[in-house]
Amino acid sequence: MANRTVKDAHSVKGTNPQYLIEKITRTRIYECRYWKEECFALTAELMVDKAMELKYVGGIYGGNIKPTPFLCLVLKMLQIQPEKDIVVEFIRNEDFKYVRALGAVYMRLTGTAIDCYKYLEPLYNDYRKVRRMNRQGEFEVVHMDEFIDELLREERALDIILPRIQKRNVLEDTNLLDPRVSALDEDIEDMETSDEEDAMKDGNRSPVGDKKRSGYRDTDRPARSPSPRYRRSRSRSPRKERHSKRRSRSKDRDRGHRSSGHRHKDDDDRRHRSKKSKHDHRHRDREDRHRDRHRDRDRGRDDHRMSKEELEIKEANELRAKLGMAPLRP
């Protein structure tokens, strides 16, 4: 009786929901200890608590084919067949990544092709690391987007043969599904526009300007030597040179005396403004540090008052509130 599907369950893919998992694997799950102790008489409400306790994903492992707790909960969901709203909330949950993975696997097994693409493709933007147990019983690290891509593209995942779904391009051609918009499209468009702007700037540069900047010299024309009549340069007499140096020095002194008064005044104004701005910045920084110190102190007091079990109960109550369930008692 404990291993039978509920009476009011609907057939999935034309068969009993539990038959989506192979008989040998299903028999091993029925005989394992986790199924007998933890999954007995589970309901949709209690399933949330068990899903939050998961620490990794996986199928079967070892030489004697032991099932993981994740696979046991997948079979239990196929047995009790929870409502679609609960499964959608599992997938949209961002706090517990293994709850999201459990909802994604159940949606891939029981949902239609449109539902699979609709609810699982947004998870491509989830790049969190997920621990997975392989067939040898060793842990390996994958990312959530890789796990979702495996569910949508591969024929077998977590030692379960996945039901076939229609290709995405077929659904797009029949207008049953909108074209997928990737999160990288905006970045690609920005890169293309920047490349076009750079190309426009390079095209607008005139060749004359480039020649001037790079010190262009036409190598086809031979280098000419100056004409003999222009080679001679006039040399000033030493008396005229001394006279011109004295004139330049006197002009520089006059300019310095005229502008010194304005310079001193501008320097004083700049010093006053810089001192005032520094004082204002120090005062603001002092106030911000004081405010952050009080905020951290209050947070530390609240976290110290709440024990580890109370924090777990608080997180569980938040998830249960999203699913419309009653909160846990402390």
Image (spheres, rainbow, N blue to C red):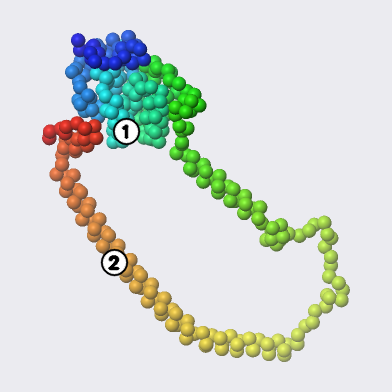
* Of 115 and 187, the residue lying toward us: 115
Tell me if I can see residue 148 in this picture: no
Foreground residue, 226 or 274?
274
Q: Which amino acid does label 2 sit on?
A: His
Residue located at (21% from left, 55% from top): 294
Q: Position of residue 167 (x, y in %)?
A: 47, 23
Does residue 286 sit above or below 231 in this rendering?
Answer: above
Q: Nearer the viewer, residue 88 or 283?
A: 88
The residue positioned 72% from the left and 89% from the top of the image is 240
Q: Position of residue 118 (x, y in %)?
A: 39, 29
The residues bearing labels 2 and 1 have C-alpha atoms spaced at a distance of 45 Å
Identify which residue is drawn at 77% across, 83% down. 235
Tell me the crowding category of disc 1: few under 14, some 14 to 19, or many 20 or more residues within 10 angstroms, Cα based. Answer: some
**Split into 4 quadrants, where in the image is the C terminus?**
top left
Residue occupied by mark 2? 283
Q: Earlier in the sequence, mark 2 or mark 1?
A: 1
Residue 166, image x and y in percent? 45, 21
Task: Check disc 1 and report the residue beneath it.
Answer: 92
Q: Nearer the viewer, residue 237 or 4?
A: 4
- Coordinates of residue 259 in the picture (x, y in percent): 51, 84
From the viewer's perspective, tell me whether residue 328 is left or right of residue 103.
left
Q: In the visual, does 138 lie left or right of 315?
A: right
Mark drawn on residue 146: none
